[in-house]
Image: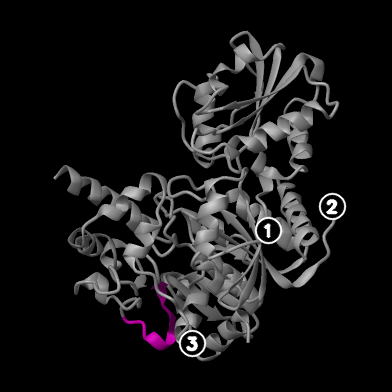
Amino acid sequence: MNLTQKLQELIHKGVRRIGELSIRLNDSNESFILTFHTDETTAKEDNYGGLELHVGPDDARDVSTHADDGTYRFVKAQTNLRRGWVMVLRSVDELRMALDQFYPASVGLHVAAMENRLEVENLRDKLNRQTGMYRFARTISDSGAQTLVKDVCGPAHQCARKILWQIDEQTPLEDSEASRYDGLLPGVPAEVTIPLLCREACNHFVAECRRVAKEEKIG
Amino acid sequence: MSIMPKPHSALLIVGHGSTENPDSSTPYFDHADEIRSRNLFAEVHCCFWKEEPSMREVLYMIDSDEVYVVPDFISEGYFTQDVIPRELELSGSTTKVRGKTLHYCLPVGVHASMTGLILRRAKEAAPDLNPADTTLIITGHGTGLNQNSTKAIRDQVDLIAASGAGFAAVLDAYMEEQPFIAEWDKMSPSPNVIIVPFFISDGLHSFQDIPVLLGIEAEVGPAASQREVFRHNPHHLRGKTLYYTSAIGTERLLADVILDQISDFDQNYK
């Protein structure tokens, strides 16, 4: 079974949420209606309640590149996706293409996790592979990295990903709201959600590690 | 060069990406869209060093067992020779990784067919100029750290000079090594100068840094997508008439060069 078929199976089993998005089948079960989750009800009205209409997955990248305030969303799990639009997708293939733009690799990562074949990359592995100006990030202390997780990650800091990695093989993340976060929006059950999985620290976190490492060096 | 459809293979376009400039990855997605529209591959994906999906994540979103990996980079260098092979766990031209067969092609910028794109871009920028009165400068980043980073540009200069295009001069110039692009007017023997940035995207370097070095702008301006007014050629500067084009990678036909690299791979290794 390929990923599109596995996505179809997930939808069939009732999955309706991924990140900040709502996935709804239209009345004739022929199309998928993708919206920001709080726009789902509006999208049920005539003419999609006046939401900005996109047909097909081609605009998914444009819709997800900037937040409402113009911020560049290079971390795609950042919870500042803009609202006010609706995307009509005419097949599971199109739905998968759209989701791959909104939340790159998330469907594949979720499926791999369900099949117990997701390989997680700990922070030290990630930092030790950085190049150029980010090479210095690897000098961050464990305690600096632990604090950074609490200061940068999790829903309190606009990230919708569930962290899977540790500092290294022997050093789990300290308990915090960020490390405990299960990738679900409040009130949304796990069985209807494709959680966004953080199998490796993102480039924003790497950049923050570099900043903290420099501060540690200066003392 | 045409390519036979590969309905059971995936194409993976690898780019650098940026955490600061949203325009940086646009060409990669444009190239992917262009190739996807031709229905040559079962699937077409992009992955990045500094954007998502990462090179370590992207295999989770690919179904096909055979994957052609094409670095959408303008030169052979540290990224294509070290970073990409390490991130994708490649050990040679063909590697089995997590059950998939990955074919590692050469970067787009080193393919001979780039010559046609450069000439096309120059012609578009200044269709009415007489080449005999015009210097063509191909400009790149340049770094003392890697000789290969400028080789692709020097090769193109040689190819265009030998092509009979008739320019008064065809030159290479760089941001950070000699000959410096900031001295474009001194190195150009003709009244007209066309400068083509040999970068994939209109990102920080080609759209923001180089215009300052050329004297088009006094200070680094906003990203291309955040500007209300695009620059207009020609610029009358330093006693010359200057035409500065978009980065070569923003040419949609670069998609053909990606396919050329795959054809070459098949000829050389399959």
Magenta highlight on residue B153: no
On-image quarter of the N terminus of chain A: bottom right
Relative horizontal placement of residue B267, taking residue B55 as reference (left or right): right
The residue under label 2 is which amino acid type? Met
Residue B209 locus on image (x, y percent):
49, 30
Residue A164 higher or lower than A145, as above or below:
below
Disc 3: host chain: A
Viewer-nearest of discs 2 and 1: 2
Residue B127 locus on image (x, y percent):
79, 26
Q: Residue at x 59, y 56 (%)?
A: B14
Toward the viewer: B122 or A96?
Answer: B122
Magenta highlight on residue A189: yes
Say the numbered circle drawn on residue B93. none
The segment highlighted magenta reads A187-198
Q: Residue furthest left?
A: A219
Residue B228 can be seen, yes or no:
no
Q: Residue at x 62, y 75 (%)?
A: B100
Q: Which residue is mark 2?
A: B1
Residue A164 locus on image (x, y percent):
34, 75
Q: Earlier in the sequence, mark 2 or mark 1?
A: 2
Q: CA distance from mark 2 to mark 3?
A: 41 Å
The residue under label 3 is which amino acid type? Glu
Disc 2: host chain: B
Say the numbered circle drawn on residue A115. 3
Query: Tell me, what colour scheme is on the image?
Result: one colour
